[in-house]
Amino acid sequence: MTPRVTLPPVSTTGTELWSLGAGELATAIREKRASSREVVRAHLDRIEAVGPRLNAIVRVLGDEALAAADDADRRLHSGEAVGPLHGVPITVKDNVDLTGSPTTQGVAAFAEAVPPIDAPHVAHLRAAGAIPIGRTNLPDFALRWHTDNALYGATRNPWDASRTPGGSSGGEGAALATGMTPLGVGNDLGGSLRWPAQCSGICSLKPTAGRIPQASAIEPADSPISIQLMSVQGPMARHVADLRLALGIMSQPSARDPWYVPAPLTGAPAPSRVAVVVDPGGQRSSSQVATGVRRAADALSAAGYSVEEVDPPDVAGAAEAWLNMLGWDIRIMWQLMAPFVSADANTFMDTFLELFPPIDPAAHLQTFIARRAIARAWAEFQQTYPLVVAPIATEPPFAVGADLTAEGVTAIRATMAMVVTVNLLGLPAAAVPVGVEDGLPQVVQVIGPSYREDLCLAAAEAIEATRGIPTPIDPR
């Protein structure tokens, strides 16, 4: 059953349809101030106008989307009941199953791997009326903090082409930032929803592990244990309200995911106390990033939150445990994957694995023990400080190619300590823009307790209300 969602009012007068958010578009369509065909056509035209400069959307589903839009308009005008995203276009990352379109993983060997069924959360979005209009780019097998692959090539950052758009949901981030889509579907194992948000100046939601059901019909359908524990599916958008809307839809049940948790979307009132972290894990944040964190803290303070600069438990230890837990499985997997990926993907992974040598079985077991201990410490910390506002990466988007050198990989990995801590612990985190400095967006993450996405989103909305929304932009 599609959840009831209250959508914001909108005026389309003098406004390009492609610049509106998903909820705004849904309202306009439902109130017959714009047709679904007009909305879909506007986004397809925007893709045609700016898409070639970015290579963010690698497969355009134009004919299928227009046919679906015509059907959506027919159903609306005939008085049929419609869902909360009726007639609204969306894009889907190319490692998420979408019927009628291959789940390529950015790898040529999967170029014709068309799934017989949608991923559960994509099916929920379609049932709510959403219309897929395109597939977005990612690195080979989604295992890189930069978006490039041999099948489709590199995605460009719309703010500065010399910088990375992030990964692995880099295509979604760039497409949203430039108005080619109002809502995107991505996933996150080591920052893949939040890091592209920082790089492109959009918002995203990494939900609690188990919140959104996930499954694939493409073999191998199931991942190693570290990925099962730490990878999640989530929405990406330009408006925090659209993250909330999408979460309510995407988080509906599916028997295809045995670890799905039917937790309520809202919880009991919590203390409005926020821990602000400027230099997580002892890593010095750049002034561009640190200024952004303090802007978010000021916005929350002005909104009535009690804000204090204090570090949560053992971020450095959590980042090390994430690396060791995931690294154990990746070393085994990469022997099978390496022949199918691009030269740059092999360079990145070989460099990464050389820099961080293998651990023995006893140390591998210890990572699971450490994970539980750190999670318990965080749960106790969040009794006092339910929310943590922190950088995503502690440096701005790195230069394209920086992740292909030993020095670059070492530096990038160090910037991601707070990002991967959230993955290790399975916590929710909303990414939200706070400004632009030095020509690049500033985006922070708001981390909450397990299954308290509502707290993250409320704080993100308070920040957005003060700091504004920097996108969509024209590619630079």
Image: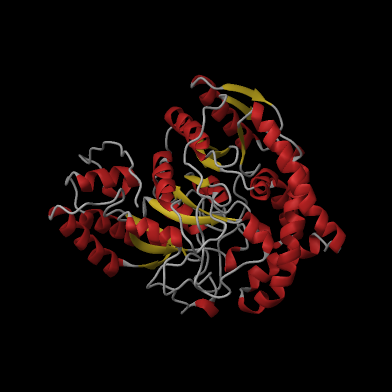
Image side of residue 115 versus residue 446, left or right: left
In depth, the one of 452 and 399 nearer the eye is 452
In depth, the one of 194 and 130 nearer the eye is 130
Give coordinates of residue 195: x percent, y percent.
57, 49
Give coordinates of residue 69: x percent, y percent.
23, 60
Image side of residue 277 versus residue 471, left or right: right
Determine the residue located farthest toward the left in the rendered image.
Answer: 78
At 54% from the left and 51% from the top, the residue drawn is: 261
> Which of the 4 image quarters holds residue 284?
top right
> Which of the 4 image quarters holds residue 44?
bottom left
Instruction: Work out whether 384 lies above or below 424.
Output: above
Instruction: Work out whether 138 lies above or below 427.
Output: below
At 42% from the left and 75% from the top, the residue drawn is: 116
In depth, the one of 126 and 88 nearer the eye is 126
Q: Is residue 1 visible?
A: yes
User: Colour scheme of this structure image?
Assistant: secondary structure
